[in-house]
Image (cartoon, rainbow, N blue to C red):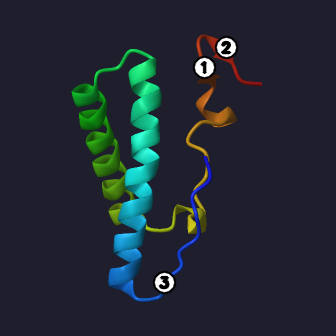
Amino acid sequence: MAFPSPKNHDPDDRLEEAANEAFNALELLLAEANKAGWGTREITQAFVLAAEALKASNDSDPDPSEDQSKPTIGPEQGQVGHGEIYD
């Protein structure tokens, strides 16, 4: 799914434009979820939970690509996965 680029520069206009585009995208996703057997109420509640989680994640770390974090599992920890031993 492609999401269009913003056409406005004013923050209020951009928010309204983004909300309209998000609504359109979610409406299409809702239709696909309904076809797959999900109920409208349950899937829209799931959309809200997912949006809240994304917002919380962005609030805590607005640009994770700038992080210089290292992997938490490596040779010094030994075991990774389901019983495999990391060499």
The percent position of residue 31, horizontal first and vertical second, equals 42, 31
Give the CA distance from mark 2 to mark 3: 52 Å
Q: First in sequence, mark 3 or 1: give its number.
A: 3
Q: Amino acid at mark 3?
A: Asn
| Picture residue at 39% right of the left edge, 34% below the top | 30
Give the CA distance from mark 3 to mark 1: 47 Å
Give the CA distance from mark 1 to mark 2: 6 Å
| Picture residue at 25% right of the left edge, 26% below the top | 42
Local secondary structure at mark 2: strand
In the image, is 26 to the left or to the right of 12?
right
Identify the residue position indicated by label 3 in the image: 8
- Displayed quadrant of residue 67: bottom right
Identify the residue position indicated by label 1 in the image: 81
| Picture residue at 37% right of the left edge, 84% below the top | 11
Q: Amino acid at mark 1?
A: Gly
Identify the residue position indicated by label 2 in the image: 84
In the image, is 84 to the left or to the right of 64?
right
In the image, is 48 to the left or to the right of 66?
left
- Displayed quadrant of residue 34: top left
Among all residues in the image, which is located at the extreme right? 87
Dot 1 and dot 2 residues touching (CB under 8 Å):
yes
Dot 2 and dot 3 residues touching (CB under 8 Å):
no
Mark 3 vs mark 1: give the one in front. 3
